[in-house]
Image: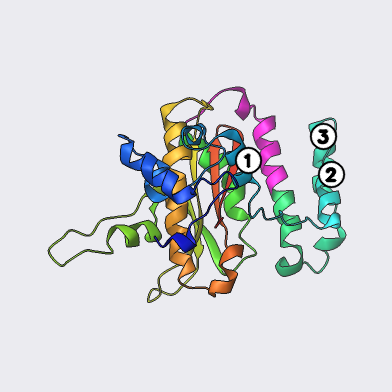
Amino acid sequence: MDDQYKWTLSTGKVVEDALYDFGVACKHEHLAHQFIVDPFNKQMESIFDEAELQEIRSANVKPMPMMPMPLRNYIASFNKKNTNEIRDVIDTRQPWQINYDIKDYGDYDWVRSSVYNMLREYEAGSFDHSHHETWYLMHVWRFVDCAFDNVPEAEAVRGETSSLASAARKNKDRVIQDRKRIGRKCDIIIRSVDCNHSTSKEYGAGETGSIVDLNGTKMLKESGIKLPKVMRDMFNSLQSRIDHAKLGDLQIVGYLHYGNQSSLFLHTLY
């Protein structure tokens, strides 16, 4: 990499050089091998000190979109003391339901539907015991899929779907006698809706587990290796399709769902 494109921190440390040196010495799979910096990952403490990590965390921070106040107020209306009161809010006809248009009020309908589905699970006692990973995908985290119902250009695909961006990277040097390699499989992939003759663009991915175990092998691998690498592949795939001047605004989203807990990841260009 040309030195002029490298990132030099205020301490004088060059990020790319530090990642390269660590990656060469590292004997196990690590984000440094793809020049990915996760400033919240404890493994990065072996490469950067706390001041350097804080500088990385504060670089190119993008504000989260603001939720419209009417939608926020509608969500707050479900803050009740018991399930019967929540049902009353669900059953109360709202002004947005008159001459309903998914383009204008799809988010409101999504909130109502999500609360109703969670309420039914709560009343049935579904959260009193643990379930298989598939159960959480179908009964809890499906509201993530439905969030894209009013985005006709995108869809959420479930079922250990292979990432097209990941596959493209793995096969970039493929010759005819080589077997075509598949991309990393994820529990959910958010992608564009395209005709069969077009390659879908991928905007995000997610992983799901049934048990919250912050130090478990599955969670550490998916949050610390698998998901960030898939997100990088998606980022690299999209950057070739957009105006270079807008590259700094590009973000890939990642979800990590374990049990009833959720974490959000964002991959961007520092």
Q: Mark 3 or mark 1, which is nearer to you?
A: 1
Which image quadrant for residue 81?
top right
Alpha-carbon neighbours of circle 2 within 10 Å: few (<14), some, or many (≥20)? Answer: few
The residue at which mark 2 appears reads as 76
The image position of residue 233, as x and y in percent, is 42, 57
Magenta-colored span? 114-132
Outermost residue to the left: 177
In front here: 147 or 20?
A: 20
Which amino acid lies under the numbered mark 3 shown in the image of this protein? Asn
Query: Where does label 1 land, which residue?
Result: 54
Mark closer to the chain start, 3 or 1: 1
| Residue 65: image location, x then y, percent | 73, 57
Circle 2 SS class: helix
Residue at the front extreme of this rendering: 12
Residue at the extreme top of the image, as rendered: 129
Residue that carries the numbered disc 3 in the rendered image: 84
